[in-house]
Image: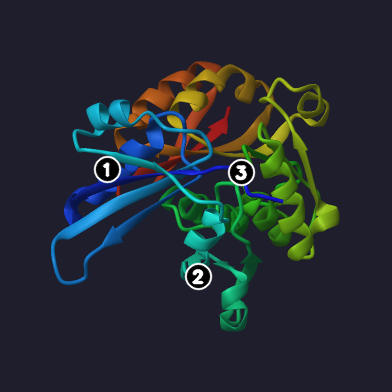
Amino acid sequence: MPNPPLWKITVPCKKSEAPNVMAAVELVPPHPQAVLIVEDPFKDNGAVEALYDVMPDGDLLTRVIGKEVHVKLLPDADWIKLSQEGLPPVRAGRFFVYGAHDAGKVPDCVVPIRIEAGMAFGTGHHETTALCLAVLSDLAKRRHYRNVLDLGCGTGLLAIGAAKIWRQKVTASDIDPVAVEITRENAVANSVGPLVAAFMADGPTHPALFRLAPFDLILANILAAPLTRLAPSVAAITAKGGVLVLSGLLRWQENLVLSFYRPHGLVLKDIWRDGSWSALVLKKA
């Protein structure tokens, strides 16, 4: 069966510019399936490359980024898998995230999570995913959460991490049916299949989520725009005293996102940062 068509963009830039270019690429719709930085080890040259399942608007990206963006249709191949197979393992808090090619490199005294490359976001390599894992690891030191939701689960990485730490059922939802299927497969591969209930939902207002609410921990690693739009409905399904972890946002978007959650009784408890990216930890009064 042929793979779905993929488009690739390439943005030549200096190494120092690459993180900001990467951030801009991820914020401009349609959102890419995978983004990576390619660098010349001996020069100050680099490039940001991204893969899309729909054709991106090269002219729009060029105007937003301020650099020429090259767009091309790729030949039939599983480029997401090929681009991620060579990525190294990630250590974030107690977690060690790896692919099949690193199965023999798992150290002792970690919570291992095996995530296979696929058409969904969340291999642990992006700063926001690693931040969420680190926050999750820190939260586990302080409290046992009994009703956890991974909202916009992608590969299911955060849901699997929560299930492994607390050994109890975790809810995972995504608007993308492919992401839901990949989450289920990854949960089985990590021996927590029965603990991760993944289903397709178009947001916190979905009836299934309302039936399971209120949640005492919600992990939402998406983007600033949907985070602000979903603030009332996310707050509505957060339990009193519950914790909300918001990520997928840049540092300059922190106050913007907070301004949408504070009116609903969410109080900022902590901010975690990595480079240009942030994760906000809020608690419902």
Q: Nearer the viewer, residue 247 or 223?
A: 223
Question: What kind of element bears circle 2?
Answer: loop
The reply to whether residue 72 is visible in this rendering is yes
Q: Whole-Å distance between the Cαs marked 1 and 3?
A: 26 Å
Q: Whole-Å distance between the Cαs marked 3 and 2?
A: 27 Å
Residue at image x 76%, y 51%?
184
Q: What residue type is labelled 3?
A: Pro
Residue 4 is marked as: 3
Residue at mark 1: 21
Q: Which amino acid does label 2 sit on?
A: Pro
Count neighbours of disc 1 (C-alpha within 10 A) and say few if under 14, some if 14 to 19, many if 20 or more.
many
Residue 89 is marked as: 2
What percent of the width, then of the height, locates residue 283?
55, 34
Question: What kind of element bears circle 3?
Answer: loop
Q: What residue type is labelled 1?
A: Val
Quadrant including the C terminus: top right
Count neighbours of disc 2 (C-alpha within 10 A) and say few if under 14, some if 14 to 19, many if 20 or more.
many
What percent of the width, then of the height, locates residue 77?
56, 56
What percent of the width, then of the height, locates residue 6?
51, 44
